[in-house]
Amino acid sequence: MFSPLILITAILNGLLTGAVYALVALGLTLIYGVLHIINFAHGALLSMALFGAFFAFRLLGLDPYLAALFLAPALFAFGYALQRFIIGPASHGDDRNILLVTLGVSVVIENVLLYAFRADTRTIDVPYAFQTLDLGFTFLPIPRVIGFGAVLAVAVALWALMTWTDLGKAIRAVAKEKLGAELVGIDVSHVYAVTFGLGTACVAIAACLLIPTYYVNPTVGEAFVLIAFTIVVLGGMGSVPGALIGGLLIGVVESLSGLFLGESLGQIGIFLIFIVVLLVRPTGLFGVKA
Amino acid sequence: MPRYVSNFTRRKFLTGTALNAATLVVPSVLKAQGAGVKLGILHPVSGALSYSGTQGRLGAALAVEEINTDGGIKGLGKIDAILGDALSTPEGGTAEVEKMNSAGVTCIIGGYASAICLAVSQAAARYELPYVVDVGVADAIVTRGLKNTFRFGPGFGTISKTALDNLVTINDAAGRPAKTVMIVHEDSLFGSGLAKLLNAQLPQHGFEILETIPHPTPTRDFNNVVLKMKAQNPDLVIPADYYNEYVLLARTMQQQRVRPKGIYSVLGGAASSYKFVKEFPDAAKYIMDCNHWFDPRNPKALALKKKVEDRGQFYTYEVYMNYSSVLLVADALSRAGAADRGKLTAALESSTFSGHVMPYGPTKFVNGQNQGAAPVNTQVLDNDIKVVLPANFAQAKPVFPMPG
């Protein structure tokens, strides 16, 4: 049996890891939860954003946290264009087509990255990468603590955007009733593209928070996507608080099951919780019935 | 009537047929002139093992380039390298064997991971296609009686024995400061096999194994593993991981200020990597590894190192093991005198090739295993990787326990 201090440390580690999962899932909950686009390209977009943050540091000397200010708008524009000019037109409004198109986009992005940068794993070395917050009984890595704060800030901003702004209302309207939204004058294609762009911008911020302590290679994003899909369903489709709480919960469950069952079986806990939630509350923790 | 039908005349049909026939004949003519040898170069260049696979492909490509620049294989012509991607899975490797066999390769070189090598060797055996394993260390690769399979490098048995003998030597020389051990290993064939061997043999040498922690590849976070280390405070940590996970583990240990008396890797994915030492000199300092390594006294090995570094790449073990494997096959082919699978297998069986860059001596295969193949012990010293054992190849003395 582990001592309480180890358990507390494992929970703290889980919360810090879960925050990054939550941010990746926030992007997905907008795209998948609100617009019902199963975005298989989400992981590839994360890999792309990680390369963006990597090269911003290596070539321009931009600190990853500073780079987020430029990378998030850039990825927003990329996501907007991707949905507006490729995914939207190519899918002809059919969900099955969307699935295949995003899968295709994912393959293209990953292979372009592979061609351009090889399979090489790259890391950056920022001065604060190994700095820790001393809690007396454990050390918390500073970059991950910063990441945790940033994820909370992004989640609050997204929640405010979805709740109080006209854009948020338009997104929710399109999600609920596309035809109705179109009839009252909402430009549905534009809203789709903006939402996709917002989801991609979240991925850009997640990349900037990850890169100080993680690595980048053309397929690195894949490791986060299955978890992100799980979080979206667990938290409730389209729910910003759901994605945040779900992400943190998954992080803690993964950490504790890793501690007790071993790292190889660490993900069992996640999927057990997932199955239980689907059985007991199929709409997810914060989801509402259609 | 559609237009394209009315445009299709008898003359056009005959011209087209003649051209097609000519195209089909050309390869046969080239073949008749002895236009070279097709070699399958198979690595996992995408997926979780893609970095190692790409490095392996680089080593093979450099050897092919060198041989072809010198006019190719004596009497047979230039090498035509058929590249394959095993996708980091055994199934991916098997699929490539089928393609390479259809393409008419004389031999396959590569595989990298044990699980891929096992699948590839079996698939290649169906076609009596010679297969030279570049790295894969699982003993089962060469103990199933497959006549087509040859491993140039050492297997688990030799590596773990050498690693244990050298660990005992180093520990004894330092007054036996290390008594307890924690093993952290990736959970596929490579890591699990090694952990099993270490679990069986370490206690016989007086070490107590506190815990053996498996983890998947990829693993996103090592904080829990390091937490367990902190709780149990082992004298020695033995990681057996692929590169990315090794780097994450070492970084997390540094972050959590876990400093055991020694980090002794066995086939550590990063501890024998110049890339790791360059990028994380503090995390890499004093780490020891029992791993594949080039012969530091061999001018050819050093020239290859320079060539690889001039290309902006790191000189990793995948590079020089694949480079040597291609040279080995080229030597066997020139002795076989024909791009014939059976003759090549016989030539490999009787190989005494010594023109490689490894500290192995002349090649001698017994049941497909090169008997001279052995790992060496390295340690990260002065921001460089130095051979510390065996004594006849050593560049420095081991520093153990790690200075605080």
Image (cartoon, rainbow, N blue to C red):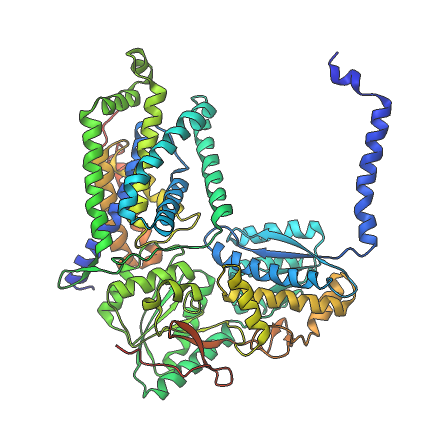
Q: Is residue A93 above or below residue A248?
A: above
- Residue closer to the observer: A230 or A192: A192
Q: Position of residue A108 (x, y in %)?
A: 49, 38
Q: Is residue A158 above or below residue A125?
A: above
Quarter-wise, where is residue B42 in the image? bottom right
Which residue is at a point 29% across and 12% down the rendered structure image? Answer: A185
- In this image, A77 relative to B363: left or right? left
Residue extending farthest front: A60
Quarter-wise, where is residue B356 in the image? bottom right
- Residue closer to the observer: A54 or B231: A54
- In this image, B37 relative to B179: left or right? right
For the image shown, how many numbered marks are present on the structure?
A: 0
Q: Position of residue A107 (x, y in %)?
A: 48, 40
Which residue is at a point 45% across and 25% down the rendered structure image? Answer: A91
State the quadrant of the C terminus of chain B.
bottom left
Instruction: Examine the rendering and report whether any part of residue B99 can be seen.
Output: yes
- In this image, B249 relative to B124: left or right? left
Instruction: Examine the rendering and report whether any part of residue A28 can be seen.
Output: no
Which residue is at a point 54% across and 79% down the rendered structure image? Answer: B297
State the quadrant of the N terminus of chain B.
top right
Q: Is residue A149 above or below residue B174?
A: above
Q: Position of residue B336 (x, y in %)?
A: 76, 68
- Residue closer to the observer: B329 or B302: B302
Q: Position of residue A116 (x, y in %)?
A: 49, 46
Which residue is at a point 51% across and 85% down the rendered structure image? Answer: B392
Q: Is residue A140 above or below residue A52?
A: below
